[in-house]
Image (tube, grey):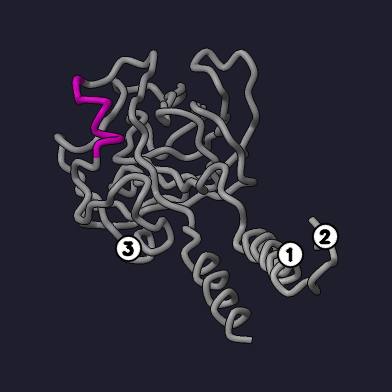
Amino acid sequence: MKTRMILAAAVLGVAATAHGAAIIQPVAVSTSLVGWGWDLNWTINQAGLYQSYVSGVTDFDVFIGQGPRHDNNAFTTWASTVGVSSGSLVFGLGGPANIESFALWNRGFSQQGVRDFDLFISDDAGFTTSTLLGSFTAPQQSSSSGTAVAQVFSFAATTGSFVRMDIHNVYGTCCISMSEVAFEANPLNVPEPGSLLLGATALALGGLRRRFAPVGLTSPV
């Protein structure tokens, strides 16, 4: 009985340590659009976020639940040239990632920012083959202070190394503009807690049967 109790506690301990979905920061971003001279990397480097996170470690839901805002000054956001209202940005995830949400800190002024867009995921930067993650409409920001809050867009968990954001139109008539992006990613190649529990229980029962098999009889393998 004692052996069974210790083993059950160990199994439950393994299941309890399973990790949830983390927030990940793209490692690269590119576009064919001409910008105002502002650095495109500001959309992925956490510059301007009032709260920071550790990519691949910080829990996505916990971080977003804290309501992190993004500043809207000219050195923490990116914008295309005036009059451009459509185009694409490609985000490199640094390798295969199983993503299920996209967080966008849009332009923090009510008359600017991305409106309608599609997200595609692919294993290669050229998007030779790709999967549509979804078509979305970003709510218009209403902050008079110019700070942006995270807008989260969810989809079926899909694995890939690159995400392309095809922007179709914007709010206002200025340009494409945004502050920051991030993704929610699940751990890859990690069994679900239920699978860990069942597997460990099966091994435990097998070990107990071998240990307490009657003398002279062959214990089942």
Q: CA distance from mark 2 to mark 1?
A: 8 Å
Question: Decide: marks 2, 3 in contact (CB < 8 A)?
Answer: no
Q: In what quadrant of the picture does the N terminus appear?
A: bottom right
Residue 170 sits above or below residue 17 on the image:
above
Determine which residue is flagged by label 1. Answer: 206
What is the magenta range? 37-45
Q: In what quadrant of the picture does the C terminus appear?
A: bottom right
Image depth: mark 2 or mark 1 in front: 2
Residue at image point 50% right, 36% down = 97
Residue in front for this viewpoint, 198 or 100: 198
Q: Position of residue 170 (x, y in %)?
A: 43, 35
For badge 1, the amino acid type reads: Gly
Q: Earlier in the sequence, mark 3 or mark 1?
A: 3
Q: Residues within 10 Å of mark 3 (few under 14, many from 20)?
A: few
Residue 111 sits above or below residue 64 on the image:
above
Residue in front for this viewpoint, 108 or 185: 185
Q: Residues within 10 Å of mark 1 (few under 14, many from 20)?
A: some
Disc on res. 220:
2
Q: Position of residue 96 (x, y in %)?
A: 51, 31
Outermost residue on the right side: it is 217
Residue at image point 46% right, 48% down = 184
For badge 3, the amino acid type reads: Gly
Determine which residue is flagged by label 3. Answer: 67
Q: Position of residue 51 (x, y in %)?
A: 22, 56
